[in-house]
Amino acid sequence: MTNRLENIGPMIRNERLRKGLTQEELGERVGVGKAQISKIESGKGLTIKTVTKVLDALGISASVVLKNEPEIDKNVIAYIVATISEFAKSHHLSVREASNYLIRFKGIDFLTEHYDAEHLLSFDDSVQDLTQVCLNNGGGIQ
């Protein structure tokens, strides 16, 4: 899944250029600044909400972009969202900061891959597991 997500930024850039749009013009369509479009195109600051808005503005369906991805159960998504929120509270972060941190240091990948075991644990135990996984992958939050 990660490789596919990493390819979204360059794909967005190529499509923007193909349509003859500047980063500023695309940003106006999406409601974000040129700097945010630049970050998205470089694969940074990707959120599902922002990427979906950008893809919509370019006339591309997110389901087409991710069509080769295995489907993720709605329960898995709900669990990941709830766990991100708990991680954010536990570490005094905003949900966005927690989400970006967990993406960067492989916490989301861990939750997705190990959902069957992790969702049976308490949120406290899951947050501890995520903290350790992120530390093992270069994160600095303890």
Image (cartoon, rainbow, N blue to C red):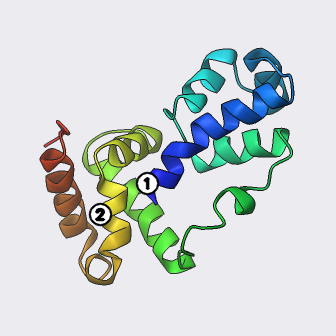
Mark 1 neighbour class, 10 Å CA radius: few under 14, some 14 to 19, many 20 or more = few
Task: Report the Cα–Cα distance between label 2 and label 1.
Answer: 11 Å
Residue for badge 2: 110
Using the image as rendered, state which of residue 107 and residue 9 is in the foreground. 9
Seen in the image, is 65 located left or right of residue 29? left
Q: Amino acid at mark 2?
A: Phe
Identify whether 43 is placed above or below 47: above
Q: Tell me where residue 25 sits by quadrant.
A: top right
Identify whether 24 is placed above or below 74: above
- The location of residue 141, given as percent across then percent down, is 18, 39
Residue for badge 1: 2
Using the image as rendered, state which of residue 116 and residue 60 is in the foreground. 60
Query: Which label's residue is closer to the chain start, 2 or 1?
Result: 1
**Going 56% across and 67% down the picture, which residue do you hit?**
69
**Going 56% across and 77% down the picture, which residue do you hit?**
74
Q: Amino acid at mark 1?
A: Thr
